[in-house]
Amino acid sequence: MSTEILIHVTNEETKVALVEDRLLAEFFFERKRSAGVVGNIYRGRVSKVLPGMQAAFVDVGLDKAAFLYVDDIYVEGMETLPEEMREDVNPIAPSLVSPVEGSQDAPPPEEAAAAKSEAPRKQPRKPIEELLSEGQEILLQMTKEPISTKGPRATTYISLPGRYLVFMPQVNHTGVSRRITNEEERQRLKEMVNGLRTGKGGYIIRTVAEGMTEAEARADMIFLELLWQDIKSRSESMKAPSLVREDLDVVFRTIRDYLTTEIQTLHIDDPKEYQRVMDFIATYMPDYQSRVRLWEGDHPLFSSYDVDRHLAKALEKKIWLKSGGYLVIDRAEALTVIDVNTGRFVGESDPEETILQTNLEAVTEIARQLRLRNIGGIIIIDFIDMEKEKNRERVFQGLQESLSRDKARTNALKISDLGLVEMSRKRVREDLVHLLGETCAYCDGKGYTKSLRTIVYEILEELRSVPTGGKGPKDRKVILFVHPEIQTVLQEEERDFLTAVERKIRRQVIIKSDPLSHIEEFSIVAP
């Protein structure tokens, strides 16, 4: 598979596209006026402790207070990994990629997590009211962007990602990426890092560290430990709420976390940014200099790779497959439903084979859309029903293989008798639709407006409740303000019904159109 990274730089924003076989697989961006917070380290002040939720809100100087759960609070003398670190990467797993507005989702769970069996057993936790008090100042790191009405999520377990290692100052543990599958190499790396450790603090050995030399490990460890000392020193001299350390910008995060041997080329279309990147590469990653290129093509970088067209499709509900089948993707607050349909694909002679081929094609596209759209939470996939068990197994295995390239943690259950797959995907920020769009001001996010006839009949029902007209000229009229399209329907298609209402209330209905009103809005003035 050909994998390339495209970086498009303008004055207002920086866009990054990960392209696999000329198809947009992942997209993230950073805007100058609205950078994200994940990965940032703050000195915050506890504003509220909630014993009933075993959580606290911490003021870090942002629009919304950060949410801190009891299991994300480091306790002095507790040398174990918190639950999320043992299950996934670490509590600040997203910081390895540090999603900002539109940036990439969390890195692979295996990227920094030791297997659960490798981690020490979790010790009983104290209740949050014994750990925190209102007004207390603490050092914490953001793990999730604000999502919808929720503020960012935070942890006091700090993690500092380097090129090969992730340093966890408060945790005495060494873990190895699960993507490094060679047991001898895993053991070599673990023994190397443990032998170089000089004091308190744990390390996660990242996937890119496969083949890492002792000199490279030592350099990474020295840098990360000095960085931690600097963060502690700066924090002690600051007053809460304040930003202690801002994570790297989207370009250097991309280089740090994505520029691996799997990447054939990294294109940058801005000369100044290209030079800045090359200076960094020459110092820290000289073996990758030949892979980084300044884009000098006749057409814009994103246009040449059709990125904008793929991005526009990622905002649509219906996704067509090459065979003629299609997917329909519907979102709810924390649930996404994906429906697979044969569409125009009719196959040749065997209906079961037609359905199998459509489902197999769908799994690849579904996995790509999950990554591209940053879909998180609960996901239900409704595959076309297959009669044969072996076919259902083939489709599920295909889905697992396609999801293996996803850097976010996923968990899928086998296809049920109804042809449904229930799965979850870790969510650390808003999905692509929310990042690039806004709730429709006209339909208010419903996705529809009432039909013209429905609105007209509501108006007629409302008119029937108007008091019967009196003897005076003013008492015999009703003024109705409506949208022009509603006026047309009332005066033409539904004129008979309107006349019947006028007779009932003994009033003449005078219709006046208001082109600036919402189509569902109307008002009745009855003197």
Image (cartoon, grey):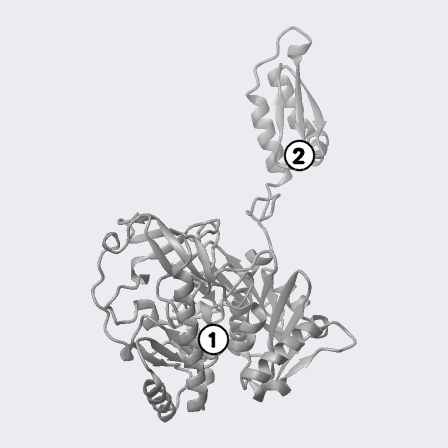
Mark 1 is surrounded, within 10 Å at the Cα level, by few (under 14), some (14 to 19) or many (20 or more) other residues, namely many
Q: Are marks 1 and 2 in contact (CB under 8 Å)?
A: no
Quadrant of image for the C terminus: top right
Q: Position of residue 167 (x, y in %)?
A: 39, 75
- As drawn, the label of residue 433 is none
Q: Most extreme residue toward the bottom, as rendered? A: 184
Q: Which residue is mark 2?
A: 517
Mark 2 is surrounded, within 10 Å at the Cα level, by few (under 14), some (14 to 19) or many (20 or more) other residues, namely few
Give the mark, 1 or 2, whose residue is nearer the N terminus.
Answer: 1
Q: Position of residue 479 (x, y in %)?
A: 67, 21
Residue type at tag 2: Ser
Q: Is residue 37 left or right of residue 272?
A: left
Residue 163 visible, this angle: yes
Q: Which residue is mark 1?
A: 403
Q: Most extreme residue toward the right, as rendered? A: 298
Of residues 397 and 208, the one drawn nearer to the viewer in this rendering: 208
Q: Is residue 63 left or right of residue 139?
A: right
Q: Position of residue 415 (x, y in %)?
A: 40, 71
Residue at the image position 55 percent from the left and 56 percent from the top: 434
